[in-house]
Amino acid sequence: MIVYSIFLVGNMRKINISGNWKLNKTASETKELLAELTAAVAGATKTEIVVCPTFVSLTTARDALQSSNVKLGAQNLFWEESGAFTGEISGTQLKNVGCEYVIIGHSERRQYFNETDATVNKRLKAALNAGLLPIVCVGETLEERESENTFTVIENQISGAFAGISAAAMAKITIAYEPVWAIGTGKTASPAQAEEVHAFIRNKIANLFNQQISENIIIQYGGSVKPSNAFELLSQPNIDGALVGGASLDAESFAGIVHAAEKIEG
Ligand code: PEP
C-alpha cells in the first residue's frame, strides 16, 4: 500500500472527542448520564468534548450541559429549511435548541437510510448554512478493505462530500474516519492502519483545498475506541480525536477517553 505522509510544522489541532449516542437513552437517562459525565470531565481543558444524543433529548441535554465544558451535537439533519418533509429536522432547528455540532453521513445512515455522497453533500451545505459545525463520516467496509479499495472508497467519499464547499467553509468541518468493519464490532483499526488512512485524507484535503486547511482540519478516528486503546490511537500524528459510539454511553468510559486525550502532548 502507498504510504501518504504530511510533515507538520507543529500540530496546532485541538483534540476532539465526540460521543455518538445513536438510538439510545431516554430524556431522563440523558440527564443522569450527563450529570455523571460533566462531573467526570470537568477538569479537562485541552480537549473539545461533544455529545450527540437523540433529537428528542437535545433540550434536556442542552440544560444539563449548561456551564460545563461539554458541547452539544445532533446525529443528522435534513437539507431543507422547512416545509412538507414529515419526520425531518432542519439545521436551524438544531441550532435553535443549542446544537453546535452535527454528525453527517454516518455509515449506519449510509447502510440503513440510503445516505449517499450526494445527500451527505446536501446535508453538509445545510449544516454550514445554519452555522453548525459538521462532523462528516467516511469509511470503507470490510469487503472494500479486503479488495484493496480502501483509498479509492475514501477518495470518492471525500470528493463527493466536499463538492462545491469553499476553503473558508472547510475550516469549520471535522472529518471522522470510521472503518465500517470496526464500528460496534470490538475490532479496532490498529494505530498504524488508522494513521495510514488519516494521512491519506489529510493529503487529499491539501490537494482539493490547500496546505493550511489540510494542516488544520481535525480528523477523528471512530471504531470501537475505548479508554484502553485511545491513547495509542490519539498519539498518531494525523489522528486528532475520536468519534465514539458504545463507550460514549457510559460516563466512566467516555471520560476515560477524554482523560487519555488530555495526556497527548501538543
Ligand atoms: C460510531 O458509531 O461512530 C462508532 C464509532 O461506534 P463504536 O465506538 O461503538 O464502534
Image: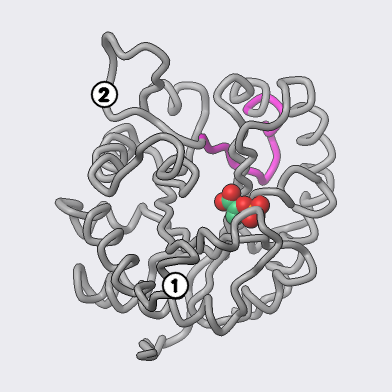
Residue that carries the numbered disc 1 in the rendered image: 145
Residue 38 x %, y %: 77, 42
Residue at 27% across, 49% down: 117
Quarter the C terminus occupies: bottom right
Disc 1 crowd rating (10 Å Cα; few below 14, some 14-19, many 20+) is some
Q: Is mark 1 within 8 Å of ligand 1?
A: no
Can the viewer see residue 48? no
Q: Element type at marker 1?
A: helix
Q: Amino acid at mark 1?
A: Arg
- Between residues 209 and 68, which one lies in front from this camera angle? 209
Can the viewer see residue 205? yes
- Is 223 placed left or right of 9 in the picture? right
Q: How is the image coloured?
A: one colour
Quarter the N terminus occupies: bottom left
Tag of residue 243:
none
Residue at 31% across, 37% down: 123
* Picture layout, residue 93 above or below residue 201: above
* Picture layout, residue 48 above or below residue 29: below
Residue that carries the numbered disc 2 in the rendered image: 80
Residue at 67% across, 60% down: 224
Residue 222 x %, y %: 57, 60
- Is 9 placed left or right of 29 in the picture? left
Query: Spatial distance from mark 2 to mark 1, Cα to Cα?
Result: 34 Å
Residue 53 x %, y %: 62, 33
Q: Amino acid at mark 2?
A: Glu
Residue range of the region highlighted in magenta in the rendering: 62-74
- Is 4 placed left or right of 81 in the picture? right
Q: Element type at marker 2?
A: loop
In magenta segment, residue 68: yes
Residue 44 x %, y %: 73, 58
Who comes first in sequence, dot 2 or dot 1?
2
